[in-house]
Image (cartoon, rainbow, N blue to C red):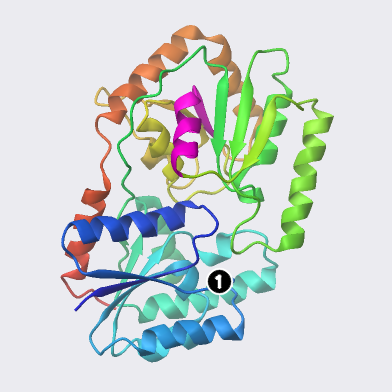
């Protein structure tokens, strides 16, 4: 009986969408029968039509079938999911607890938190994408067990590396990702030679259009105030060969996030031997890891601290010895990264056994 992977639309590039797509492909490569089903909707707060669409997808599955649901789709709509909990094997993959997505009122946070708890307690298996996230989800919702399947990463040729001045940030342009912190940090480094490309879509599936526009205007104001025009670019969402080219050109990945479940862009950079400066938040330290000598291939700073971020970037830009050490650590870490086949094998093992509720 095939496994059905139920996911949100992937029109907006995101780590969660990449995880769902690459995991489905890797499972298929292992011979696991898997069918990826996209459910349209403004998840996790869809309209009635989207909720009905999800309910139809689940109702059409035969008794005993395994449905792997992206938490963004499943966790906000227990009314669509719970009626099928007794006859289907429900596996929910939580990329980020819904209440921690940002841009919500306190009432919306409480509502989504309660909805998510109902769904996760009804699921046969709950999966998180980092050890940090598993602890977070289990503690938040009182779950006895949360499984961990970390993302894999695709092999890539090493970036040639330059003089250290080409900075890259790959993230949706939303407050949680901390572009405002990055611009404030760069504002104190105008006297140094650098350029920074901030690649990613404006907003995400759960963002309100008005909130996204207001945040974009705030970033434009920060660029004007810090006189960063011409040095910081926002080329928008890029994928495939265009994204690979952006990584290949980069000397350093910067991830200033206020919250991250894992931080797949960290391993994407390391797969090319590109060091990282990032906030030490969530699962980012796990993604960054250490090389076989125990050295970190990057610098971690206090999350939400623009001054600390600026200090780390100043060190990268002004200390050639540090750049050389981090590049060597990134090169060694690159050799030990795991691919998507490993993630698929772990997932297949979970699907082969019944998980406790």
187 drawn magenta: no
- Point 31% across, 57% down: residue: 23
| Residue interval drawn in magenta | 240-254
Could you say where residue 172 lies in the image, as x and y percent from the top left? 59, 48
Q: Nearer the viewer, residue 67 or 160?
A: 160
* Prevailing secondary structure class for the magenta stretch in the rendered image: helix
In this image, 161 relative to 334: left or right? Answer: right
Q: Write down the residue under mark 1.
A: 44
Residue 176 seen in the current view? yes
Q: Say which quarter of the image contains residue 89.
A: bottom left
Given the current orientation, which residue lies at the most extreme top position?
Answer: 320
- Point 79% across, 27% down: residue: 226
Q: Is residue 279 above or below residue 121?
A: above
Could you say where residue 202 lies in the image, as x and y percent from the top left? 65, 50
Q: Answer few, some or many: residues within 10 Å of disc 1's Cα (few below 14, many 20 plus, some between 14 and 19).
A: many
Could you say where residue 115 lies in the image, as x and y percent from the top left? 52, 78
- Point 34% across, 78% down: residue: 123
Number of marks drawn: 1
Q: Is residue 172 above or below residue 54?
A: above
In this image, 187 relative to 143: left or right? Answer: right
Q: Secondary structure at mark 1?
A: loop
Residue 78 seen in the current view? no
Which quadrant of the rendered structure holds the N terminus?
bottom left
Q: Is residue 321 above or below residue 217?
A: above
246 drawn magenta: yes
């Amino acid at each position: 009986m095939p496994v059905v992977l139920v996911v949100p639309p992937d029109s907006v590039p995101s780590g969660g969408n990449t995880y769902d797509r690459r995991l489905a492909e890797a499972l298929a490569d292992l011979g696991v029968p898997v069918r990826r089903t996209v459910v349209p909707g403004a998840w996790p707060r869809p309209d009635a039509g989207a909720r009905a669409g999800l309910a139809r997808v689940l109702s059409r599955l035969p008794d005993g079938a395994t449905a792997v649901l992206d938490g963004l789709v499943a966790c906000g709509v227990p009314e669509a999911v719970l009626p099928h909990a007794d006859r289907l094997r429900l596996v929910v993959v939580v990329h980020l607890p819904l209440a921690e997505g940002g841009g919500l009122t306190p009432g919306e946070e409480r509502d989504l938190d309660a909805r998510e708890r109902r769904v996760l307690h009804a699921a046969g298996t709950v999966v998180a994408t980092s050890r940090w996230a598993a602890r977070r989800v289990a503690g938040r919702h009182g779950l006895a067990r949360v499984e961990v399947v970390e993302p894999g990463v695709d092999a890539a040729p090493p970036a040639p590396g330059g003089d250290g001045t080409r900075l890259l940030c790959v993230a949706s342009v939303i407050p949680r990702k901390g572009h405002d912190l990055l611009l404030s940090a760069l504002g104190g480094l105008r006297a140094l030679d650098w350029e920074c490309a901030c690649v990613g879509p404006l907003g995400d599936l759960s963002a309100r259009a008005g909130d996204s526009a207001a945040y974009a205007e705030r970033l434009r104001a920060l660029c004007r105030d810090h006189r960063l025009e011409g040095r910081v670019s926002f080329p928008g969402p890029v994928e495939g060969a265009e994204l690979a080219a952006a990584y290949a050109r980069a000397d350093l990945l910067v991830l200033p996030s206020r919250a991250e479940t894992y931080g797949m862009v960290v391993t994407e950079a390391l797969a090319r031997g590109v060091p990282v400066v990032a906030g030490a938040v969530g699962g980012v330290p796990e993604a960054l890891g250490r090389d076989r000598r125990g050295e970190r291939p990057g610098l971690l700073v206090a999350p939400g601290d623009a001054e600390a971020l600026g200090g780390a970037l100043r060190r990268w830009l002004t200390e050639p010895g540090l750049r050389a050490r981090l590049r060597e650590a990134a090169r060694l870490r690159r050799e030990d990264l795991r691919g998507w086949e490993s993630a698929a094998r772990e997932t297949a093992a979970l699907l082969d056994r019944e998980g406790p509720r």
